[in-house]
Image: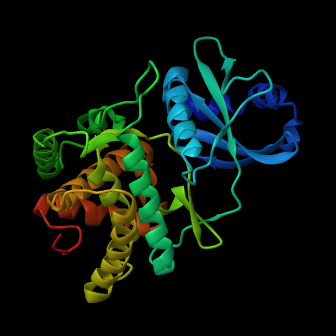
Amino acid sequence: MGKFIKDMFDNNKILESIAKIIGVEVDSLVLLKRGFQSFVFRGHYENKETIIKVTHNSHRQRALIESEIDFIKYLAESGVSVADSLRFPNGNYTEIIDLDESYFTVSLFEFSNGLRAKIAEEKSEFYQCLGEIVGRVHTLSKKYKPIQIKRPEWNENNSLRQFKQFVPDSLHKVHERFDSIILSIEELRKSNDSYGLIHGDIYPGNYLNENGKVRLIDFDRCEYSWFVSDIAMPLFYETPIPWVVDGEKRKNIALRFFNNFMEGYHKTNSIDSNWLKSIPLFIDLRQVVVISTIYRSYDFCNYEDWKQWDKEALKFYINNLETNNDYINIKF
């Protein structure tokens, strides 16, 4: 998120506008997340806790947010455990805060008391439940008919489109690997059984533990891509970097997650086993996206102030791409 957008929120008038739209006091709004894409607040709406999401149009235009909500509503009405969208008093699912030359879109979602999943620490049954939900999303995606404005294709992600701009030229081997990854993915075949609208950002912050059950939240990144991408991404995040844990222990952590996830996934969706061989390719794509995002958003002038995990992770991802190393040594 650009500094100019964050600076806008220093203007209390925007918070006052949000409060007025949903009929609460400004002081009752609690900022939960100032993320890369949106501001997320907790507040009370119609006498219950609610998530209030505020997104600048430079990240997502209103029509794209409404297409995200349409997919969420479709999944919720089909029985998938997601954080459903809520209507404003006027019946709309989104409201606009107009600025001089731009705007914020405000949307409301169900609040969940679930906890962020703990990497590599959840029970096997939890990972099976996650796999079931993701498989169900993919099965329903095959039948989904989008509203007029479609969600983006996978290669419209800003971190990919502006990779060359964000990542320094000195990392020339990373740039070469980026080109190779994009080319390899573009050559993959598409069919209704392999490609469709996916969540696109399945990491532990977006699947919550509600007393051992999973609730999937935040479809801001939902995009058209291969279903296997939604399998590769949580595996990427559930496998600690070697700085945290290495060797056979790290491999066993990855296998426990993957095997349980796929046990659940196969209950709700069928996927050709050949697609699983593409998991390393989509993990490499995720490393590319993370590297691009870090170079876009982190303060390299104050590198010494970074958390050690961030430093080690960036080094690990760059080294993997430069040396063409697998993120995790598993045969799929």
In the current view of this chain or complex, which residue is farthest to the top?
Answer: 100
Q: Quadrant of residue 233?
A: bottom left
Instruction: Answer yes or no: is residue 258 visible.
Output: yes
Residue at the spot 55% in from the left edge and 27% down from the top edge? 66
Q: Is residue 218 left or right of residue 136?
A: right
- Identify whether 237 is placed above or below 107: below
Where is residue 265 shown, x and y percent of the image? Answer: 37, 63
Q: Nearer the viewer, residue 184 or 6?
A: 184
Query: Which one is nearer the viewer's eye here, 106 or 39?
Result: 106
Quadrant housing residue 284: bottom left
- Quadrant including the C terminus: bottom left
User: Going by the image, does 177 lie left or right of 166?
Assistant: left
Counting from the top left corner in percent of width and height, residue 51 is at 70, 45
Horizontal side of residue 75 vs 90, given as left or right: left
In depth, the one of 319 and 52 nearer the eye is 52
Which of the colour schemes (rainbow, by chain, secondary structure, one colour) is used?
rainbow
Q: Residue at x 18, y 39 (%)?
A: 190
Please tell me whether residue 11 is drawn above or below residue 112 in the rendered image.
above
Give percent across and percent down for residue 80. 54, 51
Using the image, determine if residue 64 lies above or below residue 120: above
Residue 167 seen in render: no
Residue under the point 19% across and 63% down: 320
- Percent x, y for residue 194? 24, 46
Residue that lies at the very extreme toward the bottom in this rendered image: 248
Q: How many marks?
A: 0
